[in-house]
Amino acid sequence: MAEVVLYHHSQGLTEGVKAFADELRQAGHTVHTPDLYEGNTYATLDEGMDYARATGFGVIAERGVAAAQDLPANVVYAGFSLGVVPAQQLTQTRAGAAGGLFYYSCLPAEEFGSWPEGVPAQIHAMEEDPFFAEEGGDIDAARALTAAVDTVELFLYPGKEHLFADSSLPGYDEAAAKLVLQRTLDFLAGIR
């Protein structure tokens, strides 16, 4: 079974993020869910982003990196949207990383150096999500990464929602979320 650090999105450690973590735990995995927002959750993406801006994106990322310091090296780093920042950073820079799971976001690999040899990852997003497909260039970063690294897969789902696998939010898409969960479990089953 894998050990996973799952970082929440910009609305905080919501009930939907906790429920996703619980699904992984029910499959036998050890899952840590650090709270990068110190107990705060937000009803909208804009409110959550305001908190992240006020706190500082660098501070949020540092909290994520610090949350993994006492864990074993061979961990899978997973993140939802904003949580992809520490997840991808640790996947690329922490020696012994077992893999990465990036939901709704992907940064250019160059942000953190080069991709580590043999480390697998999955990227999951909706093909018409404006945050992923248009605004930030995430889809371009994801495509570049999958083209350059054969252990990284990109999964695009029909639709335009951003946080579509969070069952506690209005944009939840049950069919797509179930597929994300199944692919995640398949990925984790392959981690040694």
Image (cartoon, helix red, strand yellow):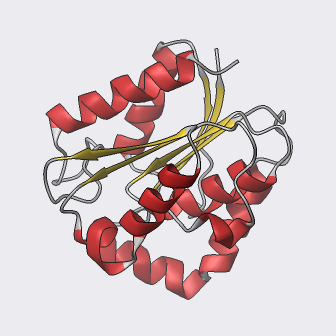
Residue at 83% across, 37% down:
96
Image spot of residue 183 (x, y percent): 38, 27
Residue 29 spot, x, y in % from top left? 59, 19
Asked if residue 40 can be seen in this view, the reply is no
Foreground residue, 35 or 150?
Answer: 150
Question: Which residue shows up at 61% across the image and 83% down it?
Answer: 56
Q: Where is 4 relative to 15, above or below?
A: above
Q: Quick one: 81 or 154, which is closer to the camera?
A: 154
Image: 130 above or below 106: below
The total of numbered circles placed on residues is 0
Q: Quadrant of residue 151?
A: top right
> Which residue is nearer to you in this view: 177 or 49?
177
From the viewer's perspective, tell me whether residue 19 is left or right of residue 102.
left
Residue located 59% across and 63% down the image: 85
Please state the horizontal and vertical placement of residue 57, each as a whole percent of the image: 60, 78
Residue 4 location (% of width, % of height): 63, 33
User: Would you identify the image quadrant in which residue 9 lies?
Assistant: bottom left
Quarter of the rendering occupied by the N terminus: top right
Q: Nearer the viewer, residue 179 or 30?
A: 179
